[in-house]
Image (spheres, rainbow, N blue to C red):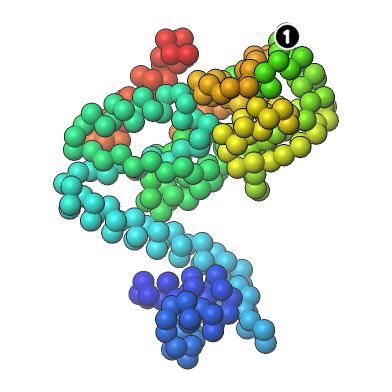
Amino acid sequence: MELRHLRYFVAVAEELNLTRAAEKLFIAQPPLTRQIKQLEEEVGVELFIRKPRGLLLTTGGEYFLEQARQILDKVDATVQDTRRIALNRKTVFSIGFVPSVFYGQLPLMVRRLRRNRNLEIVLHELKTREQVDALKAGKIDIGFGRIRIEDPDVEQELLFDEPMIAALPAGHPLTLHTPSMKELAEVPLITFPAGSGPNFSDITQGLFHRRGLRINVIQQVNDVQTALSLVASEMGFTLVPEQVRRLQREGIDYMPLADDNITTPVIASRRRGENPNAVMRLANTILDELVENRLTGRYP
């Protein structure tokens, strides 16, 4: 089995049409059909169900697609990093993050890592599920998110639980006192990110649902910046992690919550069972110090 077989398979699996896949790959359809058949024979299972109007992935094909993408991503990441290292003679350290963790300790960690002139730090904005996939593919070395995801190849470490606060339009009646979750449930809610879970939006809505509170989600958006813009436009309110308070926005008041234990986790994800190299050991040392500062109140 060669890499080209995997690339051909992924193209066909994404198009579910041999003619379109062949055009995408700039090859003729008959050779592509033969390559896919050879791949199925080598794997020992049918990867596609042939239908008059196209193809469908079998259960085995769906699994093989996921694995093939990870292999190709790993190869592409390795080639890119090799070229970058050869040109710059630097070690590449890649970090995945969700935007809501980038207003606290993470920039300090990046700043301190960048002091090492032999390091090139690469940042990737990724949802937690995407971070897990990127770790397995070798695209990133560590990820910072807020969602627990079970995966045998990735270990997750809870760094700390961060208080949640309400972002309300400036001058809103609920900014005159510390609002409760019950009071906030009466105000239209803006959540982020949009799309299927698990994500931060699920955490936010779950805080209300577990208290038996009904909410009116007026808008789902892709990121915290857009959510805050809608709050400033007086469309509603949103819940954000405490560190987002550092993002000063005109037309917004950040309010602590009257309810106790309204928090969201900050989680570090790493490849499981991998012996840390010198760069990872340095990153872990810096991270331990920053988390300790946070937990002891030396960093707000």
Residue drawn at (61%, 30%) of the image: 228
Q: Give the crowd class for mark 1: few <14, some 14-19, many >=20 residues within 10 Å.
A: few
Above or below: residue 47 compared with residue 209: below
**Which residue is under mark 1?**
176
Residue 52 at x, y = what percent?
Answer: 67, 87
Element type where label 1 sits in the image:
helix
- Left or right of 170? Residue 40 is left
Above or below: residue 36 compared with residue 105: below
Closest to the observer, 203 or 194: 194
Residue 183 at x, y = what percent?
Answer: 80, 18
Q: Quadrant of residue 56?
A: bottom right
Above or below: residue 93 compared with residue 112: below
Residue drawn at (23%, 38%) of the image: 119
- Left or right of 154? Residue 85 is left
Residue drawn at (63%, 22%) of the image: 251
- Residue 291 visible? The answer is yes
- Left or right of 167? Residue 275 is left
Q: Image quadrant for the N terminus?
A: bottom left
Residue extending farthest to the bottom is 30
Question: Which amino acid lies under the numbered mark 1 shown in the image of this protein?
Answer: Leu
Residue 298 at x, y = what percent?
Answer: 42, 10
